[in-house]
Amino acid sequence: MKLGISPAIAGRYSSKIVKIAIFATAAIGGTALASSSVFASLNAEGHNVSAHSVSTGTLKLTHAASSATGLTGGFTTPITLMAPGDTINRYINITQGGTLDGAALTLKVADAAGTTLTTDATNGLQVTVTQCSVAFTATTGACSGTTTTALATISANGLLTAQSLTGVSTTAAAVSYLKISLALPAGSELTSNGVLPVGTVQGVTSTLTWTFFETQRTATNTNS
Amino acid sequence: MFGALVIAPQALDSASASASADAFNSPALSVASGKYPVAVVTTTGAANPLAAYVSPISSATRLFYVKNFGTVAIKAFTLSVTGTNSATFVIKRCTVGANFTAVNICSDTSSPVTITAGALSLAIAAGSTQSLQFSPSKSTTATISVSVSTSQVRTGIVTNS
């Protein structure tokens, strides 16, 4: 390749011209190399014929009222006219409906109305959760299996903070049978001349949302 | 069935992400308590006076009523009777379960029984009255009070439902 330039100009720009020449040569040479079979390479791959299935489990928790005759009130049927010393037992089935085991099951209650039933830890509602190993007996609510205390008596006020449920299964597909007891303590209110005392637990209505909560079982590392 | 499926990552860091689930009732469970305000009135249809009975009265025998203005029955109440001018009172009731239909006449034809003020084991259903007969020894300004403690409310009930 000849460059048609004068010696003066060539001398002035000699270094740049040399670089251009080098680049041009390299470009031409590269093109030649790419088309040369001398530089051909081999590739290989391996893959599984049947696709590898990877699936995730589910964590599903539901609760429903007992279906036993006479025990179907659950968290649906309103409780009315509670008096000091009264106890209302409601029967709830907890189902682990997912494929993963759960862990750290808790229960808490929220009261949208915020009455003395839930703000007064002493005179307000007291809650106890009892578990039966089998479904509770219709009408009587008796347990023909083994009875355990899932949550010792605590005020509804205390249950505004989530509390652990002891011994209630979090194993996938398990069903647990719970009795939720709501008691209004005998208390010591004195009602005089038709006037309800200040801070009374009489004549008030709370609206309770019961929330069961759990986390997934501990994650595992498996070599298989 | 109530409840909800929640599979919620608790952290964006995939190394520590985990799922959780909860189940709650919707709508909320309504829990209501009853009440048992009781007061002394001069007629069965009177409204709750929200106060003790205080009034000048002659020595004539008359009837008063202890009325349960509440929604929960009581099994007893405490009666207090005082009067000015050193007056004393003879208080009578009919057989338990009966009421006066007029002075000295009980609904069950039984004879009135003299009682002493204080804790009286006379049950009064919600919205009902218990009549009592008062005979002041002289003209006086009487103060008749009634109160109900929690131990005088109907016996607690355990309900499976």
Image (spheres, rainbow, N blue to C red):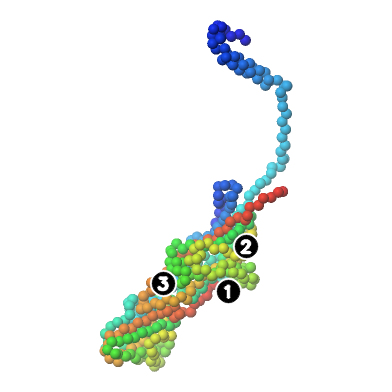
Asked whether the viewer can see residue A80, the reply is no
| N-term mark: 1 or 3 | 1
Residue that carries the numbered disc 2 in the rendered image:
A169
Residue A156 lies, in percent from the top left, at 49, 67
Image quarter (top left, top right, bottom left or bottom right) of the N terminus of chain A = top right
Chain of the residue displaying label 2: A
Q: CA distance from mark 1 to mark 3?
A: 32 Å
Q: CA distance from mark 2 to mark 3?
A: 38 Å
Per the image, label 2 sits on a secondary structure element best described as loop
Asked whether the viewer can see residue A159, the reply is yes
Q: Residues within 10 Å of mark 3 (few under 14, many from 20)?
A: some
Residue B30 lies, in percent from the top left, at 47, 66
Disc 1 residue type (three-letter): Thr
| N-term mark: 2 or 3 | 2
Tell me the quarter of the picture where residue A24 sits: top right
Residue B27 lies, in percent from the top left, at 48, 61
Residue A13 lies, in percent from the top left, at 55, 12
Question: Which residue is more in the foreground, A179 or A221?
Answer: A221
| N-term mark: 2 or 1 | 1
Residue that carries the numbered disc 1 in the rendered image:
A140
Q: CA distance from mark 2 to mark 1?
A: 24 Å
Chain of the residue displaying label 1: A
Residue that carries the numbered disc 3 in the rendered image:
A200
